[in-house]
Image (tube, rainbow, N blue to C red):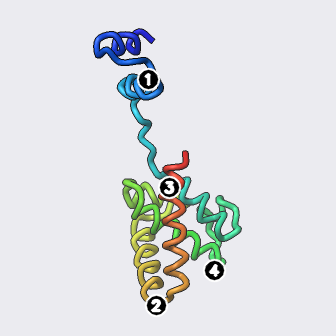
Amino acid sequence: MISLIAQSTLNSREINIDLAKEVVRSFVREIDKKITVEFIQELVANHFNIPTDKLASETRKRQVVIARQLSMYLAKKLTDQSLKAIGELFGGRDHSTVIYSCKTVQDLMETDALYKDTVSELEKKIKTSLHEK
């Protein structure tokens, strides 16, 4: 309030919404929103209608494997987590498993247009959700 009154007085400006926004903006830092591996896991699991915890399980059911590999790929692409850290969040898997998953997803995107569309759709959902929070 004091800063608002001071800005108004010093700059001979009327106190209004625009001036208030300027003053508040100078004090409030925008929260740095980051994409997390956990958020990616949740979104992908929901897309494939599987429980999130299945992504970290040992199951080799095709639908779970596809979701797990896709989640690893998106985690590598959209976060700053190391391969080892990503693997840990998927049931303690090795970094080489993350590399293999990323390669598999890239290969599938080159040969399957529908799969590529699914990857693009999920990536877009993840990125747009950042701006909605």
Q: Earlier in the sequence, mark 3 or mark 1?
A: 1
Residue at (35, 26) in percent of width and height: 26
Q: Nearer the viewer, mark 3 or mark 2?
A: 2
- 19 vs 120, nearest the viewer: 19
Quick one: label 4, few (<14), some, or many (20+) residues within 10 Å?
few
Residue that badge 3 annotates: 37
Q: Earlier in the sequence, mark 4 or mark 1?
A: 1
Distance from Cα at disc 3 to Cα at disc 1: 37 Å
Helix, strand or loop at label 4? It is helix
Distance from Cα at disc 3 to Cα at disc 4: 21 Å
Helix, strand or loop at label 2? It is helix
In this rendering, the answer to whether 117 lies above or below 130 is: below
Disc 4 + disc 2, Cβ < 8 Å: no
Q: Amino acid type of disc 4?
A: Arg
Q: Earlier in the sequence, mark 2 or mark 1?
A: 1
- 100 vs 9, nearest the viewer: 9
Residue 50 placement: quadrant:
bottom right
Residue that badge 2 annotates: 111
Residue 62 placement: quadrant:
bottom right
Q: Amino acid type of disc 3?
A: Val
Q: Would you say 81 lies left or right of 38 here?
A: left
Residue that badge 1 annotates: 20
Residue that badge 4 annotates: 62
Q: Nearer the viewer, mark 2 or mark 1?
A: 1
Distance from Cα at disc 4 to Cα at disc 2: 18 Å
In this rendering, the answer to whether 31 lies above or below 56 is: above
Q: Would you say 58 lies left or right of 93 here?
A: right
Q: Position of residue 69 (x, y in %)?
A: 51, 72
Q: Earlier in the sequence, mark 3 or mark 2?
A: 3
